[in-house]
Image (spheres, rainbow, N blue to C red):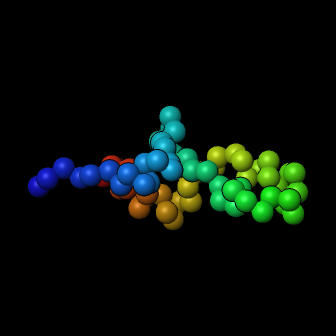
Amino acid sequence: MPKMKTHKAASKRMRRSGTGKIIRRKAYKSHILEKKSAGRKRHLGKPTVVAKSDAKRVDRMLGGK
């Protein structure tokens, strides 16, 4: 059986934290920012943990078992 390849697009967008959780950036921070409140933009700038329902799939993309 050959080695599993890392999904390069996923690896550029997500990383694993020290405790093993998968960290991602939030969407909707790239354009049309005038109508969004400062607080909303501030929260969108912070990284967050991938949802539990997606974590297994993303983990495989990043080279996990």
Residue under the image location 70 percent in, 61 percent down: 28
Q: How many marks?
A: 0
Give left or right: position of 43 versus 55.
right
Residue 59 in view here: no
Identify the residue at image location x=49%, y=44%: 15
From the viewer's perspective, is 45 left or right of 65? right
Q: Nearer the viewer, residue 38 or 43?
A: 38
x, y percent for residue 9:
42, 54
At x 64% / y 46%, what residue is drawn? 47
- Observer able to see residue 49: yes
Side of 65 where 31 appears, left or right: right
Q: Residue at x 87, y 51 (%)?
A: 38
Above or below, 53 against 1 in this view is below
**Viewer-proximal residue among 63 and 44:** 44
Instruction: Determine the residue located farthest toward the left in the rendered image.
Output: 1
The quadrant where residue 37 appears: bottom right
Percent across and percent down for residue 1 are 11, 55
Q: Position of residue 14 (x, y in %)?
A: 50, 48
Please provide percent x and percent y for residue 2. Answer: 14, 53
The image shows residue 15, relative to residue 29, as above or below, that is above
